[in-house]
Amino acid sequence: MNFSALSFPDAPLIKAPPPGPKSKAYLDYQSSHEGAAVSYPKGIPMAIRRAKGATVEDVDGNLYIDFFGGAGVMNVGHSNPEVIEAASKQLVELTHSLDIPNPARKKLVETLLSLLPEPLNKLFFGGPTGSDAVEVAVKLAKHNTRRIPMIAFEGAYHGMSAGALSLSSRLGFKEDFLPLVPEVHFVPYAYCYRCAFRKEPDTCDLDCAQYLEHILDDPHSGVGKPAAVIVEAIQGEGGSIVPPDGFFPLIREACDKHDVLMIVDEIQAGLCRTGKMFAFEHTGVIPDIVTLSKGLGGAGFPIACTAYKEKLDTWPQGKHIGTFRGNAIAYAGGNAALNFMVENNLAEHSLSLGNSMLSWLIEIERESTIVGEARGKGLMLGIELVKEKDSKEPAPELANRVRAFCHRHGLMIELGGHYSNVARFLPPLVLTEELAVKGIEIFEDAIKNAEKSL
Ligand SMILES: Cc1ncc(COP(=O)(O)O)c(C=O)c1O
């Protein structure tokens, strides 16, 4: 399919410098009437009228290239016609059914099971957010092992509900609410740019993964035998961090040796974003439990799913429930989205376009004094900004400046990273090469502009 027809042809187009007067009125209304914890509009100040493919139009008529993708939700593009058609048909048939079976639900289950590797042959739909899929995964692990401790990784983000937040590493999210769920222990992820063991990738022995094995092995590690290790195949909010080959097999090995379950959180990296249907397929290991959400609803319809091995299906009726575990529109839209991904080889497109974008970003890294590292896989890219390359001192204020510049020039991007200093690209995977080029040109100008501010 020619993806160009899916997006607005004229993006980027700035008619009224953002936030334009109409956006500003919406933003003012929002800040007067909605809670102060509202966050995205503070970094991406706009009100959105509509969106198509990999482009977004604000209420002032400005058109943006979307490298943000609704925080990695819009894998098949905004208003994907096939998703909208399936969801519209479903809308007049049935919309809500809790977990009572219906044709839309059955089709989605069939499609998902045909895509997941065979051992992951049980699915569970809980509440409609990724956080709830994580809660399901953890409860299932605890129920099966009758153990409470959990191991998560530095840089992890698994959600905002108390259990999922306990497994997320960013302290700012947790302070004021502690203690959360007890007995969660964090170990270093393979964040080679800032290696916890001060090693370089080509000379290290994957000390981070070895450290996990050490913790599980040593009776004096202070860490009780965990129910599970939860890990992102590629870390998202942590800063688009791709672990080296070998990291996951060592984690799998340590889990197997110590009879600990392995949960892979695919909520952000899954569903073709990184060049495979599931990001764990890059790693050569099969997890025991996998969480999915974000792109699964096709057009942003809320849905989450936990997939697991049949032998873990030991829990009784009603052990995890919720009112909104049966959104038939999300099932129909999600099924259409998965079919779209397969029929259009979206994983392949994401990988090849992501590779060319990354090569260009690496050139920018070479020339720039503030790009510490450009990295990522497929269309999950990160550019880590630093005050200067030698010290690697994080530069969150430059990241904010870069995002603001991009926004003013018609490009939406995300920020993340341990120090909030990573510019992140999570575009709809139907991004075209033409839009990618225009987007990176704006980004490159934003970097040059930020350099000048130093
Ligand atoms: C890897 C990962 N897990 C879990 C979540 C939480 O999903 P939700 O925001 O839908 O609760 C996110 C959200 O960004 C995520 O990136």
Image (spheres, grey):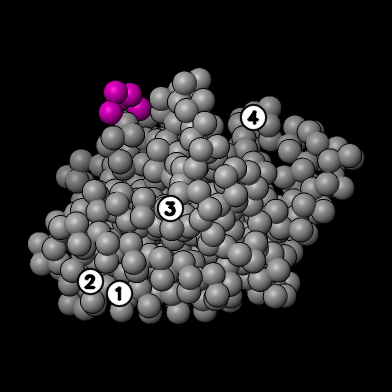
According to the picture, the residue beneath numbered tag 3 turns out to be 407
Gap between marks 4 and 3, in whole Å? 41 Å
Disc 4 versus disc 1: nearer the observer: 1
Asked whether, in this view, residue 14 is left or right of residue 150, the answer is right
- Say if mark 3 contacts mark 1, CB within 8 Å: no
Please state the horizontal and vertical placement of residue 84, each as a whole percent of the image.
77, 52
Gap between marks 2 and 3, in whole Å? 20 Å
User: Residue at (89%, 40%) from the top-left corner?
Assistant: 93
According to the picture, the residue beneath numbered tag 4 turns out to be 321
Q: Return the disc, 4 or 1, that comes first in the chain's sequence.
A: 4
Please state the horizontal and vertical placement of residue 81, each as a whole percent of the image.
76, 58
Q: Can you tell which mark lies on residue 264?
A: none
Magenta-colored span: 175-180
Q: Amino acid at mark 3?
A: His
Circle 4 — which element? loop
According to the picture, the residue beneath numbered tag 2 turns out to be 368
Mark 2 crowdedness (10 Å alpha carbons): few <14, some 14-19, many ≥20: some
- Say if mark 1 contacts mark 2, CB within 8 Å: yes
Gap between marks 1 and 2, in whole Å? 6 Å
Disc 4 versus disc 2: nearer the observer: 2
- The residue carrying mark 4 has its beta carbon less than 8 Å from ligand 1: no
Disc 3 versus disc 1: nearer the observer: 3
Circle 2 — which element? loop
The N terminus is located in which quarter? Answer: bottom right
